[in-house]
Image (tube, rainbow, N blue to C red):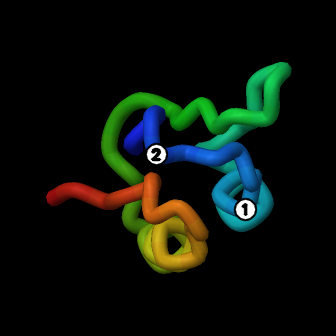
């Protein structure tokens, strides 16, 4: 995640609440560690939906 590029739209938390929560200012806090295989599709969808392109997946 690019915290500088994030604009706190909150779409990532809406699409992937299992791994992303919003802090008191509306910015995402991503759970540490790897994305579970069962959530890979949802994680890709959340990253693609980020209007600021601040959420990215790494291998």
> For the point 45% across and 54% down, which residue is it?
54
Foreground of the two, 39 or 53: 53
Location of the N terminus (image quadrant): top left
**Residue position for label 1:** 11
Q: Residue 5 location in percent, x, y? A: 46, 45
Foreground of the two, 36 or 10: 10
**Residue position for label 2:** 5
Res. 37 image quadrant: bottom left
Total marks placed:
2
Query: On screen, 44 above or below 16?
Result: below
> For the point 75% across and 52% down, which residue is it?
10
> For the point 79% across and 34% down, which residue is it?
26
Q: Residue 36 location in percent, x, y? A: 41, 55
Q: Of marks 2 and 1, which one's residue comes earlier in the chain?
A: 2
Q: Secondary structure at mark 2?
A: loop
Q: Residue 32 location in percent, x, y? A: 41, 29
Query: On screen, 2 above or below 41?
Result: above
Res. 29 image quadrant: top right
**Residue lying farthest top?**
24
Query: On screen, 8 above or below 14?
Result: above
**Label 2: how many residues lie within 10 Å, few (<14), some (14-19) or many (20+)?**
few
């Amino acid at each position: 995640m690019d915290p500088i590029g994030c604009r706190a739209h909150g779409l990532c938390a809406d699409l992937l609440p299992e791994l992303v929560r919003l802090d008191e200012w509306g910015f995402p806090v991503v759970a540490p560690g790897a994305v579970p295989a069962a959530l890979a599709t949802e994680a890709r969808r959340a990253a693609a939906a980020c209007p600021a392109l601040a959420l990215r997946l790494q291998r």
